[in-house]
Image (cartoon, rainbow, N blue to C red):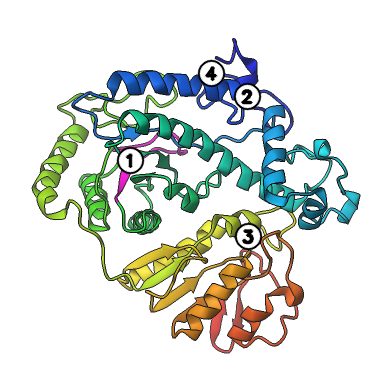
């Protein structure tokens, strides 16, 4: 495809073509790519739609590609026109008066390609929003084709957890079954906590609907510096953990370990040792146990979660921009630390978007939401006024939806809510620096 139709190849921020030879070498906004993808999907749906073994359609795999090419630029402009309507509104949202970046022609608006110095942060933020939406369009186009052929068959695609390329809340609403890939490090003493976090997050994205583990490793992966196998019993433990936290299915990548290619040392259910190897014997035992459990757990749902952790991809994207207060602050690590405290307290926990209905929760925790919309802030204030308990971490409510710092350094509604009269300044700490104040220690 790339040789016959080079316009289907993506370009990086420097304008260089990302050639074939790896995987996912497609430009998501290429009309040619989308046309051929639809034709292939049509043929597959027509051929296999009536097959008795068909249980679910799995569209694509780990959508994660960015593209800074010309067709992506044109699609980005259309997305911006739909979002803002006028150039004046765009200039205001992006704060283009700074560094004399003002636009007077839509054709001059580009993706945040490589620039001499820092890109406009709101331009970068909008490009991430656009990319998530563009990839979602690709998924929906193929989903609609298979749904037309087989309206009774559910459709999904698999998330990579904490992947910045997708707003998982928006995507999950368009899936019949929410599915996720999960690869904890078998040497990580908190691997089970990471698994619990991803399961809680995926279950919450399903909003009470079905969800599943699409990929996990039966043994080692191939992309860590040192790829350790799973000790005996760990595969079983983590598989049953997913079921206990609500998963409707637990699958693996891959069936048989590849003999060639980039992932030939990524484990499969049948390893290079063959069907008599330890890995396949453990997988068979897990399958037998799941068969015994299936009658009792199929279709059941986790109940009793009266604590919610708030998570929003827009806030995460904005908090990781160039020019931020501290590169030592990693949003994913902050969220994981807060979830760990709840996990260690054996507290059943859900995740929620800050604009969602929070009335069902006794406690809502905000590890860090640097960016909050007016609607989200009003939602949090209303939750507290309705009797809920809200606990928030640092750098929350600093910016609005355009990554514009709010007057006072924190929205006045939140300052009133938390009893903060004046936020004098932020004082980031170095990685090895600690501070003690009134008996509390922080890093």
In front: 169, or 65? 169
Q: Specify few, some or many for label 4: CA neighbours under 10 Å numbering under 14, 14-19, or 20 or more.
A: few
The answer to which quarter of the image holds residue 388 is bottom left
Residue 167 sits above or below residue 271 on the image: below
The picture places residue 58, in percent across and down from the top left corner, at 36, 33
The answer to which quarter of the image holds residue 16 is top right
Residue farthest along the top direction in this orientation = 4
Identify residue for label 3.
328
The label shown at residue 18 is 2
| Main SS of residues in magenta | loop
The picture places residue 400, in percent across and down from the top left corner, at 68, 65
What residue range appears in magenta? Answer: 210-228
Seen at 41% across and 75% down, the residue is 359
The label shown at residue 55 is none
Name the mark nearer the viewer: 1 or 3: 1
Sequence-earlier tag: 3 or 4:
4
Identify residue for label 1.
214
């Amino acid at each position: 495809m790339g040789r016959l139709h080079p316009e289907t190849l993506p370009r990086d921020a420097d304008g260089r073509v990302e050639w074939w030879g790896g995987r996912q070498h497609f430009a998501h906004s290429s009309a040619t790519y989308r046309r051929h993808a639809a034709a292939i999907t049509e043929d597959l749906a027509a051929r296999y739609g009536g097959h008795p073994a068909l249980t679910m359609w799995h569209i694509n795999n780990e959508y994660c590609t960015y593209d800074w090419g010309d067709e992506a630029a044109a699609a980005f402009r259309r997305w911006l026109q739909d979002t803002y309507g006028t150039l004046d509104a765009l200039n205001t949202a992006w704060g283009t008066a700074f560094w004399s970046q003002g636009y007077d022609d839509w054709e001059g608006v580009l993706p945040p390609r490589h620039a001499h110095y820092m890109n406009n942060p709101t331009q970068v933020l909008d490009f991430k929003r656009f990319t998530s939406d563009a990839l979602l369009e690709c998924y929906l186009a193929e989903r609609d084709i298979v749904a037309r052929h087989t309206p009774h068959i559910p459709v999904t695609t698999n998330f990579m957890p904490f992947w910045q390329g997708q707003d998982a809340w928006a995507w999950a609403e368009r899936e019949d079954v929410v599915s996720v890939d999960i690869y904890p490090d078998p040497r990580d003493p908190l691997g089970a906590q990471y698994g619990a976090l991803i399961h809680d997050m995926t279950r919450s994205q399903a909003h009470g609907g079905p969800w599943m583990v699409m990929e996990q490793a039966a043994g080692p992966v191939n992309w860590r510096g040192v790829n350790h196998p799973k000790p005996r019993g760990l595969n079983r433990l983590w598989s049953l953990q997913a079921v206990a936290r609500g998963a409707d299915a637990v699958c693996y990548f891959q069936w048989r370990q590849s003999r060639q290619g980039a992932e030939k040392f990524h484990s499969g259910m049948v390893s290079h040792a063959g069907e008599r190897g330890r890995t396949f014997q453990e997988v068979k035992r897990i399958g037998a146990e799941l068969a015994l459990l299936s009658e009792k757990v199929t279709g059941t749902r986790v109940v009793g979660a009266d604590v919610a952790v708030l998570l929003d991809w827009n806030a995460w994207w904005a908090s990781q921009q160039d020019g931020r207060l501290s590169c030592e602050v990693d949003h994913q690590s902050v969220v994981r630390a807060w979830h760990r405290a709840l996990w260690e307290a054996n507290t059943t926990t859900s995740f929620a978007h800050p604009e969602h209905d929070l009335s069902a929760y006794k406690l809502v925790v905000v590890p860090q939401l640097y960016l909050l919309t007016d609607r989200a802030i009003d939602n949090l204030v209303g939750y507290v006024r309705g009797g809920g308990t809200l606990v928030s971490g640092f750098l929350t409510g600093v910016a609005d939806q355009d990554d514009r710092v709010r007057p006072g350094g924190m929205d006045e509604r939140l300052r009133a809510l938390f009893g903060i009269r004046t936020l004098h300044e932020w004082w980031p700490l170095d990685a090895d620096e600690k501070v003690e104040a009134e008996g509390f220690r922080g890093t």
